[in-house]
Amino acid sequence: MIKRLFDWLKQPLGLIAVGITFLALFSLAAYGISLTQKPPEQPLQFPHRTHVAFGIQCLYCHPGASKGPAAGIPSQAKCWGCHNQIQKTQTSELLKPLKDAVLSGTPLEWVPVAQVPDFVQFNHRAHVAAGQNCENCHGDMTKVTIAENPQVMNMGWCLDCHKTIAGEDHEKLVKLVDCGTCHY
Amino acid sequence: MSNKFSRRDFLKLAGVGAATTAILTGCGPASRYVKREPYMLMPEYTYNGQSTYYATTCRECAAGCGLIVRTSQGRAIKTEGNANNPLNLGKTCARGQATLQGLYNPDRVTDPAKAGASITWDAATQAVVDALKNHKPDEIAFLMGTTSDHLFDLVTDLAAATGINAPVRFGALSMFESRATLSTAAENLFGQRGLPFFDVGGAQVVFSFGANFLETWLSPVSYTRGFAGLREAQTKMRGTFVQFESRMSATGGKADEWMPIRPGTEAMVVLAIGKLVAEKRGGTMPHAFIEVDPANVAAKSGIKLETLEQLAEKFASSAGALAIPGGAALGQSNGLTVAEAVLALNALVDNFGKPGGVYFSALAPNQTEYQRAASVQEMQGFIQKMAEGKFKVLFIHGVNPVFELPASLGFKEALSGVGQVISFATFPDETAQEADYVLPDHHSLESWGYQRVVTGSAQPVLSGSQPVVSPFYNTRATADVLIAAAQLAGGKFAQALPFTDEVEFLQSKVAPLMNSADGFFSAADINTFMAYFQQYGGWWKTLDGRAVPVAANLLNHSLSGAEAEFAGEGEFFFVPFVSPTLAEAGANKPWLQELPDPTTTVMWNTWVEINPETAHELGLEDDDVVKIISEAGELEVPVYRYPAIRPDTIAMPFGQGHTAYSRYADNRGVNPADLLGQYFNEAGDLAFAGMKVKIEKTGKKQPLSRMESIMGVYGVGLGEEH
């Protein structure tokens, strides 16, 4: 039975069938992977550029960046502190999700844009303390609505910067490229 | 090409299959799908991904250990000991660790209620106002637990200013510890009120007469540290520990020698050892030990005379000998004599006020004299008044007397003699179920307060509490309810509690310590002082505050070596003991239920310990249900054959047998307090180990869940199906 199946598969028509099946499976897999890489929809189209244009500092909304590992998402109370006093908030269709969320006491579910895998112990504080500006990694927020990553945040990118900064200072280099610096 | 499916073909097909599976299941990171919710309202000092730590005080028992609670995103996630607190120096017991499960217990009382129906806090406060205003002062009574000292102080102030009855405190732990006996013995012999402190850590030889100081006794974390000091062998000789008790406790299991003496002979054994020690030390025989005859004691107690002599030799020859009274030895008709005899034994080796000796516990910073919880005899008087209708209003906080007091005292029945019962229970316990109003207090991790450290620390310590999380439910601090009600009631009530809230009251109570020079911190203004108070988890003095007992006439005190009297007809001595894992209020926490008992490894249940020889004579196996009959009642409970108990004694743990108190506790096991009659020792403490009981077979079987093999300690039944 199985021998006959293999014999049939080895004739030209069989080979074509195998090829088609393989391609179908491959494209399905590729689609599957692309799905895992596609972030879900943001709850609202947050305009970073508008906020930066009003002169609001990054650390006003993301104070955790100078204090600890996570920059954090501002509490809705903080959003509402300003928006409550802005007339447009009451009428704007774009701001309706915020208004609804605050008034009903339900949290908006934001989708993180810049992230590293769980096995990386990233800490914002050290980077801010070393004098890095937010835009060095996160790009120019005066240009974007929802934040975008100007680069893929992978290990090569991290190490590239760490090496450049260390320069000729060997002791610094050892500290900055040591595995245990980020993976512990 | 062979007829068969070739090896090569198989590998090809398997390879394609595996690769396809791997690709389809997806190697990509799933974290892209993560969504993050911001806070509605960000708590102060909170940063995402960073824990915040708060210092507070454990209220699982009255010891007053300091805790550091780790919180993340506004949720308490771990408790550990506060390393700064001189009492526990960073350690906790299992109950302290399990505090969190009280906080997150799904069956907490969530709203104020009248007769089971939710009401508003305004209505609830009005009920308290009416209760205070519409009754004569002597018709109003407060029954409180042994924790929440700040609330006790508040009610004491209220009572003093308005003439209502002074609050009465009670707790099952102080009942099983026989605290009244300890302090009465100290008062009789030293002429000074106070709780003795036994410096186990500095001693070389410790004789404990029933004290379960590694489990729940007085201040278990502190005494456990002391025990570690006793055993420490780097800088000195490893200390020796001998335990005298009829049933081996978890503490007794740690002893070098365990002396299973016959219940009731503790006093004479202590006196006999005292006499032999005095003989070895020479000089005139102290009056206290003259009458006792060691040979007679050996015959009665079941310890050989030569063993008594060896023990006396060990005690007399050591530079740091210490004797401790406690547990079942004091819960007998002659418990006070036992306690006095043990103190006399200490006086004989002259260890008062010396390292490894006996001290008076340091009084807490805002305390002027020693206070203790009511003895059961005092509770009997209280219940009598309730039954006679002398109390029209009874406020109950922090104690569950329907469960904790022996049923024979009739607390539950006496409640019907009280016009109105207002409970402040956090959990729906048996007493709250009988109450007219339940006005739930916050859980201790949501509460302000302080607890005085009564014993266990050389320095006087006031452990401070602060909320580590916002209250989860519609609960309100009892102090706030009383302050609000007093303000609404006006007149002398409002004058008695002139505060806006609980925190202002707390500040008024700790303010006198602010400029104290002997504190480990001081401050010029109250806000700074309170900030430190919260940050460090309390305030304590830097110097040793223990007093040295004066033993002038102690050894001339006449002590009777008579045997204790036992009530009841049965053939077995009955020893109830506090479950080392659950104690009186741990049954509502699954962690503690799941924690195996240290000696039997039984979990989630009550058992009766019977010596295997006795069980064999009675034809009993493990898990056979027996009926235990005392004068006061009867219970059905499965047998655990326990080799470390005298054949004439049976023992049961106290802690289970709830009929309410959350889904984890109710209808689980039985309460041995139901078997206890109204017998007291000379100090008014319950003679809980002073009864004899009968055993009857029932023919039923109930398997106990336990960590050791279900086959038991002897491997009986190996290979059989279970």
Image (tube, coloured by chain):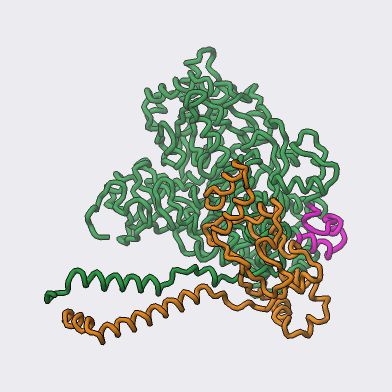
| Main SS category, magenta section | helix
Along the viewing direction, whichever of B289 and B158 lies nearer the viewer: B158
Residue at 60% across / 52% down in the picture? A162
Q: Is residue B173 left or right of residue B708?
A: right
Residue found at the very far left of the displayed protein: B3
User: Residue B57's spot in the image, x, y percent?
Assistant: 65, 49
User: Residue B408's spot in the image, x, y percent?
Assistant: 53, 56
Along the viewing direction, whichever of A170 and B470 lies nearer the viewer: A170
The image quarter in which residue A160 lies? bottom right
Residue found at the very far top of the displayed protein: B283
Chain letter for the part of the structure drawn in green: B
User: Residue B444's spot in the image, x, y percent?
Assistant: 65, 56
Q: Is residue B17 left or right of residue B521?
A: left
User: Residue B611's spot in the image, x, y percent?
Assistant: 34, 45
Q: Is residue B587 left or right of residue B521?
A: left
Q: Is residue B274 left or right of residue A111?
A: left
Q: Quadrant of the N terminus of chain B?
A: bottom left
Q: Which residues are magenta?
A: B480-505
Residue at 61% across / 37% down in the picture? B456
Q: In this rendering, is residue B587 above or below B555? A: below
The image quarter in which residue B523 lies? top right
Q: Quadrant of the C terminus of chain B?
A: bottom left
Chain letter for the part of the structure drawn in orange: A
Query: Is residue B389 shown to the viewer in this render?
Result: no
Q: Is residue B483 magenta?
A: yes
Q: In this rendering, is residue B471 above or below B646? A: below
